[in-house]
Amino acid sequence: MTNGVIIQFNNVTKQYDNDPPVLKDVSFEIERGKFYTLLGPSGCGKTTILRLIAGFTEASEGEIFFNEKKINDIPANKRQVNTVFQDYALFPHLNVFENVAFGLRIKKLKNAEIEQKVREALSFVNLKGYETREIREMSGGQRQRVAIARAIVNEPEVILLDEPLSALDLKLRTEMQYELRELQRRLGITFIFVTHDQEEALAMSDEIFVIDKGKIQQSGTPTDIYDEPINRFVADFIGESNIVKGRMIADYRVEFVGKEFECVDQGLNENEPVEIVIRPEDMVITTLEHGKLQVRVDSQLFRGVHYEICCYDKDENEWLVHSTKKANVGDKIGLYFDAEAIHVMRHGETEEEFDRRLEAYTDVEPDGK
Amino acid sequence: MENKLSRNLYMVPYVLWIVLFVIAPIFLVVYYSFFDIEGNLSFINYQKFFTPVYLKMTFSSFWYAFLITAISLLIAYPTALLLTKTKHKQLWLLLIIVPSWINLLLKAYAFLGIFGTYGVTNSFLEVIGIGAQQILFTDFSFVFVSVYIFIPFMILPIFNSLNELNPTLLDAANDLGASKWITFRRVIFPLTMDGVKSGCQVVFIPALSLFMLTRLIAGNRVITLGTAIEQHFLVTRDWGMGSTIAVFLIISMFLIMIVTGTRKRGV
Ligand SMILES: Nc1ncnc2c1ncn2[C@@H]1O[C@H](COP(=O)(O)OP(=O)(O)O)[C@@H](O)[C@H]1O
Ligand SMILES: [Mg+2]
C-alpha cells in the first residue's frame, strides 16, 4: 500500500508572518507514476503546496515525506523533484542547450553524456534543432517546452508544473494538454500539475485535488469529482451546476423547490437540510406535463456543441440546461431528470464521512436496483 | 512638411547644446594640442607624450584607476546584494547615496581632519598602542578616499540590476541542484553583468582623471594624467601639452565606453 506513495503531507500548515495561514492542516498522499492536478481559484495555496514539495519554503507545521523519508529540512537543491515554473524561469543569458544542460552541468556529468541527454530531452519535447537558439528568440509555446525539457532531463521522480499552460493561447493550450499527458505516460514519472482551469484538470488528470482557502476540499478521479461533488464550492467550481436548498424526507426521498422527488441517496437523517446539485446536461427539455419542473425560458446561448438555456421556475430559482435542442425564449417548458441526476450534499461533511456514505451506496446498490 | 519643420525646431536647443558643450571643447582641445609652448604649430607635444615621463604617468593613472575600480567593485557588489535582501532596501540605498551629493572637496577636507597627524585615526591608533602613523599623503589614503567617494556610483547600477533580477530564476537554479555559490556564479553574476559594467564605467573614467584628491590626500605623491593636465594649464601654462594629454584621455574614455558598453540581453 505505502509502497506506491512517493509524497506524503501530514497535517501541513503554512503561515507567513502573522497573516492567517495560507495552508491549513493539509494532508494527502501522492502515488508514484500518476498525473495529479491541484485545482483551485487563484490565491488558494496551489503554488504554496508546490513550493513546499520543491523546498523553496518551509512548512510552519506538519511533516512532508518523500519516499518515506521526512524532507522538511532538506534543501531544494538536494531534492529529487524538478519544477516547471509559471513564467518558465528560463535563464536569459544561456541558449536553449545550456538551459537544458544546467542541471546536468551541476551534477558534473561528462560532456558527451550531457550532449546526448540534452538532445534526447529536446527531441522529447519536439525541439530538435533549436539547441543554439537564444531564449528571447523562442515563442511562448517553445519556451514552455524548453522549461519542460530542462526539468525532465534530470530524470526526477516527480515533476511539478505550476500553471504551465496559462500563458498560452487556447489552441496551443489544448495541444499542449495532449502533449503533456502523453509525455507523462511515456516517462512514467509522477506529475503534479497546478491549474485554475477546471476543464484542463478534468481532461488531464488521474487524480484531482480541489483546493479552496488553503484546504483540500475534495480529492478523487475527474469523474468522481464531477459526478459526486462534496460541497457547494466543488460543485460550483467544477463544471456548471444547478444548486438549490432541499430537505431529506426519508431514504431515497428528497424535497426541493416545494416538491418531493425520488433520489438514490440514503443514510441521511430524516428532515436533514441538504443542498441539491443537478448538472445542466442531466436536464432534458420536455412538455410541461411530462416535466418534473415547470420553468420559463429566460435566455439562450449557442455554445457550439449545445445550447445553454437559462430558465427560471415560479420561485425565481435559476435552472441552467444544456441541450442540443433549441428552445424558444419566453416559452414555458418542462424539465425532466432521472433520480440518479439528483446529487445530495450534506452540510459540513468531511471527505472521510462523504466517502463512507458513498461506499455504503455501492454496497446496497446491487439489490437496491 | 510643417511637422518636419517643428521637429527641426525642437532639435535646435539639443544641437546647440551638443555643438557648444561637446563638439566645440573637443575640437579646441585637439586644436591646441598641435601648438608648442611658444605657439608654433608642431607635433612636439605628441612626441613628448611618448617619453618615459608621460608614459609612466599614464601607466600610474590607469593603475590607480584600476585599483580604485576593483576595490570599489569588491565592496559594492556584496553591499548591493545585501541591500536587495533587506526589508527597507530603498531607504538603505538612499542612505548610501546621500554622501555622494556632498561636494568632493568637502569630503576630501573632512579626510584631512580624519587622517591628519593629530586626527581621529591617529588618536585612536595611539590609544590602542600602535602609535601615530603617517596616513595622509600615502598611496593608501589616496585609494581609500577615492574608493569612499566613488562607491555609491558603483553600488547604484549593481543594486538596480540585482533588483531587476527575476527571483524565480534563483529558485529555478536551486531546483536544478545549484548551491548558493553556484547560483551566484552561473546565474546572479552573469545576469547583473550590465550593472557591473556601468558601475565600472562610472568609476573608472572619472578615477582616471582625478586631480584635486591627488594633491590634497596624496600630497602629489601620486601624479595622474588629471594632475598633469591641471599643472600644464594652470602652472606651467603649456596649454598645448595639457591638451595633448587630454586628447589621449578622451580617446581612452571612448575606448573604455566601447569595451564596457552595455549590450541589452535577455527576454
Ligand atoms: N511570500 C509570501 N508572503 C506572504 N504571503 C504569501 C507569500 N506567498 C504567497 N502568499 C499568500 O499565500 C496565498 C496563496 O498563494 P499561492 O499559493 O501563490 O496561491 P495560488 O498559487 O493558488 O494562486 C495568497 O493569499 C498569497 O498572497
Ligand atoms: Mg500560483
Image (cartoon, coloured by chain):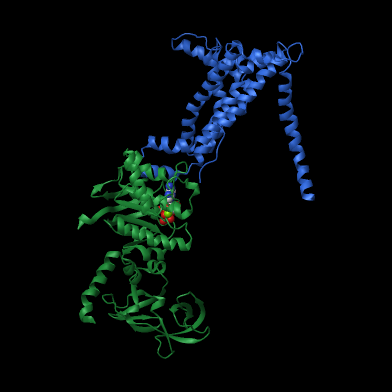
Chain colours: A green, B blue
Question: On the rendered structure, is B9 left or right of B50?
Answer: right
Nearest to the observer: residue B96 or residue A203? A203
Of the pair B180 and A29, the residue shown nearer to us: B180
Give percent across and percent down for residue A344. 33, 74
Residue B258 seen in the figure: yes
Q: Position of residue B33 (x, y in %)?
A: 71, 18
Counting the numbered discs, the total is 0
For image coordinates 29% across by 68% down, the residue present is: A354
A333 relative to A130, above or below: below
Residue occupying the point 65% across, 13% down: B47
Q: In this rendering, does residue A83 appear at all?
A: no
Left/right of residue B198 with respect to residue A87 in the rendered view: right
Q: Relative to A129, does residue B111 appear above or below in the rendering?
A: above
- Ligand 2, what quadrant? bottom left
Find residue A280 and report its image quarter: bottom left
Residue B264 placed where, x, y %? 55, 40
Q: Quadrant of residue B229?
A: top right
Residue B215 in percent (x, y) is at 62, 13
Q: Is residue A342 above or below residue A204?
A: below
